[in-house]
Image (spheres, coloured by chain):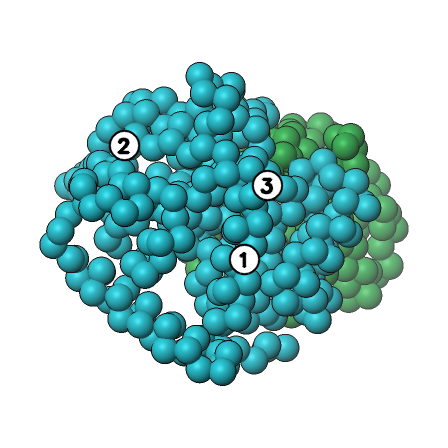
Amino acid sequence: MDIASKGDDAGGTANSSGDTVVSANSVEKTYDSVLPFTRSVEVLDGATLHVERGQVVGIMGENGSGKSTLMGILAGVLDHDAGEVERAGSIGWCPQEPRLYDRLTVDETFQLFGTAYGMSDDEIVEARAWLTEVLDFERFRDRQIRHLSGGNRQKVNLSVALMHEPDLLLLDEPYTGFDWETFLAFWDLTEELRTRGVGVAIISHIINERDRFDVVYELHEGHLHRQEIGDDDGLSSEPTDDDVACERTASFIDEAGAGSGQRATAGQEESE
Amino acid sequence: MSTVHRTLAGIQASTRSFVREPFTVVLLVVLPALSIQIYGIGMGQFPDVGVFAVSGSVATVGRITGAVFATGALAGVLGLFQMISARHADRRLAICGFRGVELVTARFATVAVASAVVSVVATLSLIVLVDDPIRAPLAAFGGLAIAGAIYGLLGIVVGSVLPKELEGSLLLVILADVDNVFASGLFGIEDSITQFAPLAHPHAIVTEAVVEGALATGHLVPALGHLSLFAILSVAAYTYQLESGGDA
């Protein structure tokens, strides 16, 4: 039972384009109910997406549109019913909810997941030093995960996905709970990864971030609509309720950031 | 990175998670003694002759029954909570490169350690609380260890297919209670029925060790048979939940 290499899962197969790190073609996914009198839910219906090396791709859509399901399928965590998914190289997956061991410390978490990735002790220490400095949580290294604030937990969650410097990074709303400075540090880090040739796919709710992406896919009724940045074709012109809410969030962040570096979502004292 | 290295890292992480919950450790120490005393006092209210067909004093058999119940229920709940708290992280670890067999080994080793700790505490409590000295304490420990291991594995099964803390723990405690009543032999239920109760043979081993000072070899093989059966069931259940994304 080798889950990491099951089927076309992590580790992946080489695909037709040498620059493509993940390619999903006509992917379908339905959640079937085993209970009587409850209906099945069709989430993806022919979704197609490609991520190239050095490309930052945004995936947007309403709540419940299936973004996390799509991300799970791309990461190899979820099975799909039809279609093809091909991956090339190593994957870093940052799920929406941190899937970490609550009673391990930050250092122990790095050590355990670094071991899973096959990294040496020196490589783990180096990756830990880099990420704790860039994302500013070095002082919490000896804390257990359950004692961290939501934002710091999310930093560890992101770091676990990044620490082995993967070829493809799959991030499901990675900055939930981040303060403004960390939010900016995250995008600096993403730029750095882009220049290194890492393909990055990010689920995002913040419309104002569109300019940061090379390509945006909007997931609507099971289909992915692709848009190169600067091209409005293929996107629905009518704003959804989520769009309005996200615009408000973005404005809030902008206003907070326009100040003297004050924290937009901070106030996160660590609990002991 | 070798399989042994990864497996040891997994065991180390699981063990740390286990011992870092002080409330669990307190329960481990207190509950067996409490259960032994309650069963002993409760059963001790009945006269030794004419009500129950038992080999020792009714109070002693009551204490043995309390020890077996506490060991089974505690080990089962610990196995359940370990499964529930780690299932999503286990899945992520698998995606990051851990092999299924390494995760299974780490998870089962931790359940084995937890069951052994519960059994040691229950044995020591029994030694202290039983009126007469236990003549075969190692055999008593062996019986309790098998009872703990069986229910630890049952905790993995329940945690895999019913990953809910309240419902899962209620199910395990009720199962342990009913199973223990069957196993105790107090109510003269047909042997043809009681022999299928998972705790029946471990209970008989502990009783023989405490009352007769001997190892009940006739019950050892069936007890280990039950243990093997639950080991197979729990591996299948754990593998199922791991492959279904930790959301089984």
Q: Quadrant of the C terminus of chain A?
A: bottom right
Please give the chain letter of the residue carrying mark 2: A
- Of all residues shown, which one is farthest toward the front? A230
- Marks counted in the figure total 3
Chain that the image shows in cyan: A
The circle drawn on residue A227 is none
- How busy is the neighbourhood of tag 1: few (under 14 within 10 Å), some, or many (20 plus)? few
Viewer-proximal residue, B224 or A115?
A115
Q: Which residue is mark 2?
A: A47
Quadrant hosting residue B7: top right
Instruction: Work out how far the residue at label 1 is from the one at label 2, CA to CA, in angstroms.
Output: 30 Å
The residue at which mark 1 appears reads as: A188
Which image quadrant: the N terminus of chain A?
Answer: top right
The chain drawn in green is B
User: The disc labelled 3 sits on which kind of residue?
Assistant: Arg
Q: Secondary structure at mark 2?
A: strand
